[in-house]
Image (cartoon, rainbow, N blue to C red):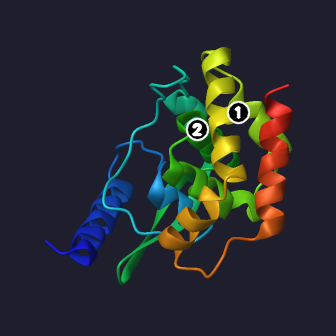
Amino acid sequence: MSQEDRSEALIEVLEELEQSDIGFVLVGGYAISQFEARFSTDLDRLGCRQTKAEWSFDYLRTHSSPTTISGGTQSTTARAADGEVLVAAKLHSGRKTDLADVLAAIPSINLDMVETHLHRGDADALRDQLSEAQTFIEEGGLDHRFKSMFGQSSASAEDIETLLEFLKRQQE
């Protein structure tokens, strides 16, 4: 199955879920697409192995809203976690892909609100994740990752600086 076919199949699954009685909230790549078009080939669940942080379904449902989700040539409306919750979860994970997703959301989110969702789980492990993210960004890795994921010529230097300052504040 091609990537486009797979993406369109996932959009169809989202449409069926939206029409069913099954409660769900999108997280991951499809939820990030509310800020920047991004290809994804899976549907995620939320919980962080690295920091043991968790967000309950009720919490996610409270901090979510219906949004347009695109995949391939199709789109649908589905409930996605608010950007501030997504960014908090992605900072806990700290993978390079997650950091690029965070950067894509920066212009559209309130970092003060991210802070309200961020501090949970193992505080030392979170500090380690944030420190590693800071190092990756300072070494220039985020700009390359962002360009490869979102097909843009470069990431905003201002957005990168905003993210770095936020990461530094959260480690204090």
Residue 74 x/y as whole percent: 36, 80
Q: As drawn, is 161 to the left or to the right of 82?
A: right
Classify 72 as above or below 89. below
Residue 73 in picture, x, y percent from top left = 36, 84
Q: Secondary structure at mark 1?
A: helix
Instruction: Residue at 23%, 68% (x, y): give it.
Output: 6
Q: Look at the image and tell me whether residue 42 can be seen.
A: yes
Contact between marks 1 and 2 (CB within 8 A): the answer is: yes
- Horizontal side, residue 2 vs residue 171: left or right: left
* 93, 75: nearer the viewer: 93
Q: Which residue is mark 1?
A: 117
Q: Quadrant of the rendered structure where residue 129 is?
A: top right
Picture quarter with the C terminus: top right
Of residues 8 and 52, the one drawn nearer to the viewer in this rendering: 52
Give the alpha-carbon distance from disc 1 to disc 2, as whole Å: 8 Å
Camera-side mark, 1 or 2: 2
Q: Identify the residue at image location x=66%, y=76%.
A: 154
What residue sits 53% from the left and 36% below the top? 93
Three-letter code for the amino acid on which mark 2 is drawn: Ala
Q: Is residue 69 left or right of 13 when viewed as pictured?
A: right
Query: Quadrant where the N terminus lies?
Result: bottom left
Q: Secondary structure at mark 2?
A: helix
Please determine whether, in this image, residue 43 is positioned above or below residue 59: below
Q: Quadrant of residue 114?
A: top right
Q: In this rendering, does residue 83 appear at all?
A: no
Amino acid at dot 1: His
Left or right relative to 49: residue 104: right
The percent position of residue 39, horizontal first and vertical second, equals 41, 69
The foreground one among 130 and 36 is: 130
Residue 89: assigned label: 2
Name the residue rendered at 58%, 38% in the picture.
Answer: 89
Compared with 91, 51 (above or below) is above
